[in-house]
Image (cartoon, helix red, strand yellow):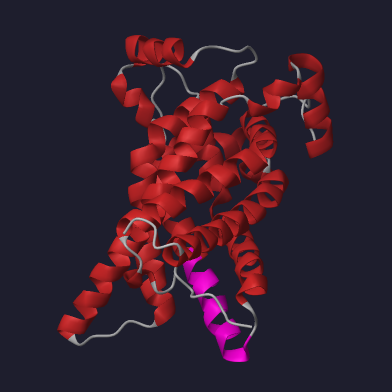
Amino acid sequence: MSQRTDHLRRGSDVPPKVSAFAGAVSGLVARMTTAPLDVVKIRLQLQISGNKYHGIIQTLRTIVKEEGLFALWKGNVPAAAMYIIYGGVQFSAYTTYNTWLTKLQGETGYRLSAPVHSLLVGSLAGCTSTLVSYPCDLLRTRFVNNRSFSKIGATVGNIIANEGPLAFFKGANAAMLSISIYTGLLFWSYESARIVSHKIGVFPSIVEPVCGFGAGAFAKAIVFPLDLIRKRLQVNKGKSGSLLAMGISVVRNEGLRGLYKGFLVSLIKNAPTSALSIWTFEYVVHWCVRMNYFN
């Protein structure tokens, strides 16, 4: 049985437009599959006091009972846009930065180890894609937090009128820090596992989802508190607040455990999301190359 090429690790061989297309598709697939869990996670993260939501199943039931089944896909339009933009930019940027860094190392004669190379390139790609897609992320959080349905145009206009254009980037500092660490760890752990799997001869069809699952779970556990703080800042309408101040406020009022509200559902959601995203990216790139697409 022939093995598929590991396009992510050998990103310099993949045209940027193919990486962008495959990344966008992978982002959309991951979003549509895990949207209800995303809504549950955000509701748990934003619950400051009380015990209205406690646990995945109970939260799902409460949302469906009070707001209807479609409430599990609240914010799906901006979220889908965010995932498409983020996925396309992330993998395209990863390919571009990978090519640039590989060329730079060839010119200077200095060689980074494969894991360090992936860590650096992954962090840069994560920051780039986060910054480009962040307004959609904020809109997604606002919609999920809203117990009623509202239109995107009205919400955008309301934010601009009452909070100013910069409000679309509330919590962006937490997001940049979080995603640079997360993406770097994700690609580093994924590619480290891929290198080992290549040495022992495990088939890519098994390696891709398993490595993606493990990499996503490990990375999410490290950065989850930053994700919670970012969500709190995003819904902090009309108020200013720093990353540190919000973190201290959460710990003071809710304890250290408050920083990990929604962590279990995030872990359940994020690991398969990462696996789906990476596996879909590899599959779509393989298909594009085989069909000579984009050429």
- Please provide percent x and percent y for residue 62: 80, 23
- Please provide percent x and percent y for residue 222: 56, 58
Quadrant containing the C terminus in the rendered view: bottom left
Q: Is residue 202 a member of the stretch shown in magenta?
A: no
Residue 244 placement, left or right of 57: left
Question: Residue furthest toward the front?
Answer: 291
Find residue 55 and report its image quarter.
top right
Q: In the displayed structure, would residue 49 be above or below residue 86? A: above
Find residue 238 and report its image quarter.
top left
Stretch in magenta: 187-201
Q: Is residue 197 a member of the stretch shown in magenta?
A: yes
Residue 69 placement, left or right of 12: right
Quadrant containing the N terminus in the rendered view: bottom right
How many labels sit on residues? 0
Q: Is the magenta stretch mostly helix, strand or loop?
A: helix
Question: Residue furthest toward the left?
Answer: 107
Q: Residue at x 61, y 69 (%)?
A: 211
Q: In the displayed structure, would residue 142 be above or below residue 283? A: above
- Please provide percent x and percent y for residue 111: 29, 85
Inspect this view and state whether residue 127 appears: yes
Q: Which residue is drawn at 54% across and 70% down?
A: 190
Residue 152 placement, left or right of 143: left
Inspect this view and state whether residue 244 appears: no
Q: Residue at x 75, y 22 (%)?
A: 69
- Please provide percent x and percent y for residue 124: 33, 58
Q: Residue at x 78, y 27 (%)?
A: 51
Q: Residue 127 or 222: which is nearer the viewer? A: 127
